[in-house]
Amino acid sequence: MATKITGSLIDEQPLKKKVKLSARKNDEEIPLSKLKIKLKNKEPQVQKIKKENLKDERPLNKLLQHSEKTPDGETETKIESNENSLNIKSEGDSEESYKWWEEGIQDGVKKWDTLQHNGVLFPPPYEPLPSNVKLIYDGVPVTLPLDAEEVAGFFGVMINTDHAKNPVFQKNFFADFQKVLKKSGGVVEPKDTKITVFKKCDFSKIFEYYESKREERKQMSRADKKKIKDEKDKLEEPYKYCILDGRKEQVGNFRVEPPSLFRGRGQHPKTGCLKTRVFPEDIILNLGPGSPVPEPPSGHQWGEIRRDNTVQWLAMWKENIFNSVKYVRFAANSSLKGISDYKKFEKARELKIHIDAIRDDYKKKLYSKVMFERQIAVATYLIDVFALRAGGEKGDDEADTVGCCSLRYEHIELSEPNNVTFDFLGKDSIRYYQKVEVDKQVFKSLKLFKKSPKKKGDQLFDRLDPSILNKHLQGYMPGLTAKVFRTYNASKTMQDQIDAMDIKAEEPVQEKLLKYNAANREVAILCNHQKSVSKNHETSMQKANDKIQELLWQKIRLKKCLLQLKPDLKKIDKKFFAEIDDFKKEKELEVIEKIYERDIVKYKRKFTSENEKRKEKSEALLPDEDLKEWLESAEKSRADLIKEVETGADFSEEFMKKSGDEEKIRAKIKKFEERIQVAFIQLKDRDDNSQVSLGTSKINYIDPRLSVMFSKKFGVPIERLFTKTLRDKFTWAIESADETWRF
DNA sequence: TTGGTGACTTAGAAAAAAACGG
DNA sequence: CCGTTTTTTTCTAAGTCACCAA
């Protein structure tokens, strides 16, 4: 039996040759990749590094030199194969048979054999302000020690932002600024100045300086910009890649975070605190066994060299504000990330098998007399139905946000018979505000959880926390946690949406795409993924709407034109011409005004920009008469149009000639109709999307194989669904799913 | 049983790049 | 071609969850 395969058998058979796409039915044999995981679980926590696993010890740059640019610009690495290496593809290894994403990675066990990289890229050192740019304190320009000046600069550069207007931000910044100032010896000049009152600080000179620098950069020529970009790329090059188990893989955030003022989300108690500069001494590098240690920046030492192959980070340091760990990790397109991603979605698919039983069970337990059980049941219900997060406990030094387990009395409002209004701040202080109907028994239970003596500020689920809840969920299915429900329900929603789609092959891709986005949007709404509306959303909507009105008007005009040509048509096809009367005179005039306004702006802009160009080349400027002439022509066409409207359809001979015969006009009308239709749908799509962020669910929740399936089923190029980065991240999905794939 | 911490995924804002339109 | 708008990528904050020690 397949289940009796022993460890030694697995060792004899290279993993890559054997794996099959795992089928999910009970009667199927367990794929080797799964067995491998079981085996790994029994292995010691940190594997002893076998001598033969010690790989190429040449410095990384030597190894990377083997990289060559192929004609299409893609980088390909040629690294000599090593017999002991499990992961290098060897000759004759057919593409299909090696599905690396099915390999097992587990916490606490070996994740790789060898790893080489060049360490991390540090941000450039602080560039002092010119001597004439100073913080002004109490009306007096002060010279600060460089360390303090840098911090003042962090604030100065952002005084026009909302952050800088936030009193908490100001307070935290100022406290840290004072600390740095004190530590670095106080104000240099005038010597005994004490900076004690935030309000007396005037950062405007610093702000202006950085603003001018920014402007300078913007004004740079194309070539200069490119030069700077190239230099930056060259600097980054060595850090972009690492070699993992003999393969060249991309590193994600190889750049150490530069010092800055912490920008917490929402009402964060620590916002504005100084995030201090990270030095090589703060950094722990993680390398493969025997891999050479990258050279630290001159005059410095690495904090520690670790060789831990049970984790997937390349470097880490502790950040000063919360003393939490920051990692340098692999990029999203790396194999390890791909494997985890694949496993995440497979775990969510596994839930499919159990979901009915789980729902039956929690519905039953909604009636439990035991408070603990009742709370578990209700929490599971909320997580399942409304896709709430687990909701761990948070500290006083964090923003007050909640998830399911940490919901408090004030976060839900109940109204008979079974309506619940959720109103709370979730992750990233994004508001979750929903009026919903819930199961009757859930409603009763929630009422019970809010019953006296509970009051504002008290926990709704006083017997729960995420670890208790998750422990309970494991009982349903191994590896089941609260977050699996979010993945499951998101992907399930997408699958259902795709199933319900009515898409015809001949439909334009654009429209298919809109339907995909609509489905995507359903998921995003379920997960409450939001974005702040862009500040010019309103105007851009207005603009798009004006555009549609204009198109509509042009269509009407053509219809009138048609009537002028053949007045008899009106009687024959009343319906076709009915909308002429619907489009009222005032509306026409409005459109004409809009066109006129637009023209005016256009001409004025053209005039000034043309003159600026001429000024630069010291040529003669355009005379004001030119502008006047242009404006007059705009005026004239407006007057003509108004006359046209006032007198009823009475088009000039010229216009009639341009319009052509009946057939031609009808064709034009049809074109306009199409354009109006498309513009209208796109407007609506954009408006619907204005507060909803589709990206997060696409990247993290919707099984990418669903998108691949959609792409193949409806003939929409995958490029239209996934950006380049996303295609790289989801190669595993693109290579494994076809048009029949189901979540 | 709690509390801390380490390692990982998920998140929206902001910056950068690409596409658009006149 | 150039300024503007839209899309994509980068950045790093903010979650989840497992594990460990007391």
Image (cartoon, coloured by chain):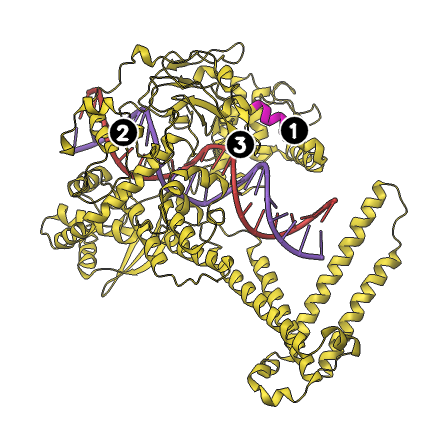
Chain colours: A yellow, B purple, C red
- Give the farthest residue toward the left: A369
**Foreground: disc 1 or disc 2:** 2
Image position of A437 with respect to A479: above or below? below
Relative to residue A623, is residue A227 drawn left or right? left
Q: Which amino acid, mark 2?
A: Gln
Q: Residue at x 29, y 22 (%)?
A: A110
Q: Is residue A159 visible?
A: no
Q: Is residue A117 visible?
A: yes
Q: Which residues are magenta?
A: A229-235
Taking depth in this image into account, of A590 and A143 the one nearest to the observer is: A590
Within-10-Å neighbours for mark 3: few <14, some 14–19, many 20+: few
User: In the image, residue A709 lies at what x, y percent?
Assistant: 38, 50
Relative to residue A212, is residue A22 drawn left or right? left
- Mark 2 or mark 1, which is nearer the start of the sequence? 2
Q: Main secondary structure of the magenta part?
A: helix
Q: Quadrant of residue A319?
A: top left
Within-10-Å neighbours for mark 1: few <14, some 14–19, many 20+: few
Determine the secondary structure under disc 2: loop
The residue that mark 2 highlights is A106
Image position of A278 with respect to A511: above or below? above
The residue that mark 3 highlights is A74
The residue that mark 1 highlights is A228
User: In the image, residue A253 lies at what x, y percent?
Assistant: 47, 29
The residues tagged by marks 1 and 2 sit, at their Cα atoms, a distance apart of 42 Å
Q: Which mark is residue A3?
A: none
Taking depth in this image into account, of B20 and A319 the one nearest to the observer is: B20
Q: Report if residue A57 lies within the magenta region.
A: no
Residue under disc 1 on the same chain as residue under disc 3: yes
User: In the image, residue A636 lies at what x, y percent?
Assistant: 80, 70
